Image (spheres, rainbow, N blue to C red):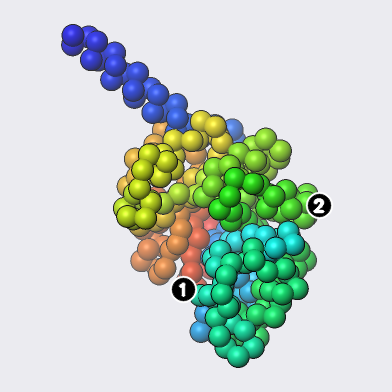
Amino acid sequence: MKKGLVTCGALIAGGYLYSIMPSLRTHKDMEKLKTYRYAHRGLHDNASDAPENSLRAFAKAADAGYGIELDVQLSKDDIPVIMHDFVLGRIARDEYGNAPEGKVRDYTFEELQKFFLLDSDQRIPSFAQVLELVNGRVPLIVEYKTEEKEMTVCEKGNELLKDYRGLYCVESFNPMAVNWYRIHRPDIIRGQLSDAYTQDPNYQGALYAALEYLMLNWKTKPDFIAFNRKHEENLSRKLCRKLFHNTAVGWTIKDEDQLIEAKQLYDIVIFDSFVPKQGPRVNL
């Protein structure tokens, strides 16, 4: 009986470790990515003329030498655009200062250009505009935003990135997007985003538990795990870094104290709400 329990326990532990095992490869560009600190949605201030995910915020980050994290999703006519939220209300304003209804996906790119980003003169940029602006000056962390199983956003984003000469990697909360890159662009560094889903009553059930504890890594084989820094104690996250030596990314660092703490926990940090005193580069 005891031997059977031990065997059963060993099988369960082995199955768990197999399920969370990330990529074990050493990508040639990973060390380069680690030498930068990354400005979350650009070097932005939503109370300024450079709000999040705006061309001006990206220009400020690139000019200062910071890496950039940004969010890509599709317009109604399948143009990759830069916007974090699926819905427009929080960040977009019409010409009268009102928040528009609906989602980014409900509007064509031309229609989206009628909106401003908060109280600035900035518009919702296309991914192509951002790539032209940055032009390889600093590395990019490209997050694909998709609520659906359909991966057109990866296809359209990749069409723009395949000829881009700058350093970049991709990530997504959706394992299907990470897996799309594993299949179609295995040469590109890919990352799995995650969070403490099950602490939110809106995200309950086996699927969200599996996503929180990275149990689809066996399929997607991410080169890095990007986790909410508030939940750094997540066992799977820690095992991916300590046991499997997978690169750990921490988001979002909000001040200098958090940045100092993050140095011990993460290999790459994504920050906003302040400008790091240490500057844009990391001494490895």
The residue nearer to you, when weighing 36 against 77, is: 77
Q: Residue furthest left?
A: 2
The residue nearer to you, when weighing 202 against 277, is: 202
Compared to residue 167, the image places residue 56 above or below, namely below
Residue wearing tag 2: 163
Q: Residue furthest bottom?
A: 96
Rendered location of residue 275, percent (x, y) = 50, 73
Rendered location of residue 226, percent (x, y) = 48, 50
Q: Secondary structure at mark 2?
A: loop
Rendered location of residue 227, percent (x, y) = 44, 51
Q: Quadrant of the N terminus?
A: top left
Residue wearing tag 1: 273
* Residue displayed at 45% across by 62% down: 252
Type of the residue with mark 1: Ser
Q: CA distance from mark 2 to mark 1?
A: 32 Å
Type of the residue with mark 2: Asp
**Dot placed on the residue nearer the N-terminal end, 2 or 1:** 2
* Residue displayed at 29% across by 16% down: 8
Residue 6 falls in image quadrant: top left
| 77 sits left or right of 242 in the view | right
Whether residue 168 is visible to the viewer of this picture, yes or no, is yes
